Amino acid sequence: MEKPPDTTDDASAQMTRAGIRTLLGNPQSAILKLSLPMIIAMSLQTLYNLVDTFWVSGLGPDALAALGFVFPFFFIAVGLSNGLGVGGGSAISRMIGAHNKRGADNIAVHTIVLMVILSGVFTIPLFFFAEDIFLLIGAGRTAGLASAYGRIIFLGAILIFFTNIANAILRAEGDARRAMYAMVLSAGLNIVLDPIFIYTFGMGVEGAAWATVISLAVSSVLMLNWLLVKKDTYVSFAFRGFRFDRDALRDILRVGLPASVQMLCMAGTMMIMNYLIIVVANTDGVAVYSVGWRVVSVAITPLLAIATAVVTVSGAAYGAHAFRKAEIGHLYATKIGFFIGCAIAAATFVLAPQITAAFTMTEATAHLAGDLTTFLRIVCIFYPTTAFGIFSSSLFQGAGKGMYSLLVTILRSIILTPLFAAIFAVTLGWGLVGVWWGLVAGNSIGSATAFIWARYYTCSLASERFSLWR
């Protein structure tokens, strides 16, 4: 395997080499070493989402509902960029496992080029037709607020795409620490800027959007320096004379495209749930779902962070045809994730009233308290099962089986969750509570299905490898 740039006195270059050694070593150790920095970074980043919601809640329920209508589109931007990042990162990790640095460099360049194209396709229609879109999906009186917030977010979409792609490239080569630094900087700056822009400058929901865009811009500059100026990462970038390579595109898109569609499915689920909530309740229900789901995002952040490590470790293992390593890493991560999920579920159930109080302090939002507490205490039931689904999808992504990961996501997000929510909320007449129980049933059954499939897949590959060796 070709070595990284020869800068032995450079601490960041030493971290790069250490990351490669970790990636190719013991899978359990690699899961831990790659997970811990990402747990810290992603926890702070999702904490920012709660802080953002906290400050916006002071503007009233219409402002919260506006964020709820924009959030699926924000999630689409994150989903598309994360999907492309997962595709590129998985392919880079497999190249590292196969000791092919030139292939890893080529994948990295293609990922950046695809990122620029995809961000443009996302931004242009949403920016110009924002208000029409929000009216179409039922925003009603909150369409103006949603448009004001959304247009700024859409304008800064290139920054959302770049930060996620750059982070994925760093993680793919085992450099989770610098990925953490960039994410912590962005989230920390956002937390500081939110109250200044929303209240001190009197910008309202638009201030929250500008705080997000500015913080992403600062983080982007930092990672641009590492990747393209300082050039001390394992992968190298040479854009001069660039031409699309069919094999590189296939390696990226066979995981990246299904991964992006997965995120789109989840965004679609949010839109379906918003619609279903309006049918059985009103926009206050959307506000509860918007706030509650952000709490859920914080709760499962440690699991999402571990999932990034599972993709990277699985990718390197499959690239080296070390299938037993992939199986060990998957099971180890799932065990850790299950116990983390149980602990977080218990804490959420007990502290639900206190969590709710942070978002219902104003007179305008106080009436949401009961519904929000109910949401938190019901939905936390599926936290322990989340690890089984998330890590199984990550294993498939690392192995280059993006379609397998997509299929289990479609089953969970598009089929099971809306189906159970509709049955409980409408057919059985449970109303909002039925929607929340639908989330629990759909996610739990979908996760169990994904885990069974992943175990079958890894066991069959390991046994096939053993038979060939014999």
Image: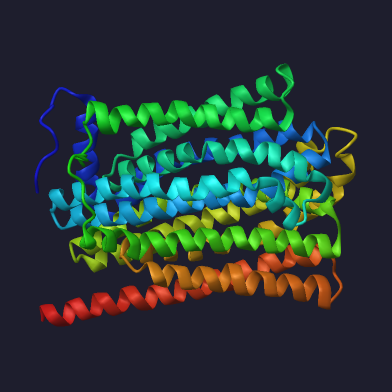
In the rendered image of this protein, does residue 225 appear above or below residue 273? Answer: above
Q: Is 80 placed left or right of 108 in the picture? A: right
Q: Residue at x 48, y 63 (%)?
A: 261
Please give left or right for residue 232 compared with residue 131 in the image: left
Residue 276's x, y, as percent?
77, 65
Nearest to the observer: residue 350 or residue 190: 190
In this view, 118 is above or below 331: above
> Along the horizontal axis of the image, is 5 left or right of 214?
left
Residue 174: image quadrant is top left
Q: Position of residue 353 (x, y in %)?
A: 79, 44
Q: Residue at x 81, y 54 (%)?
A: 285
Q: Position of residue 47 (x, y in %)?
A: 59, 37
User: Is residue 409 visible from the viewing direction of this image?
Assistant: yes
Could you say which is closer to the camera, residue 122 or residue 368?
122
Number of labels in the image equals 0
Answer whether residue 383 is visible to the viewer in this image: no
Which quadrant is home to the C terminus? bottom left
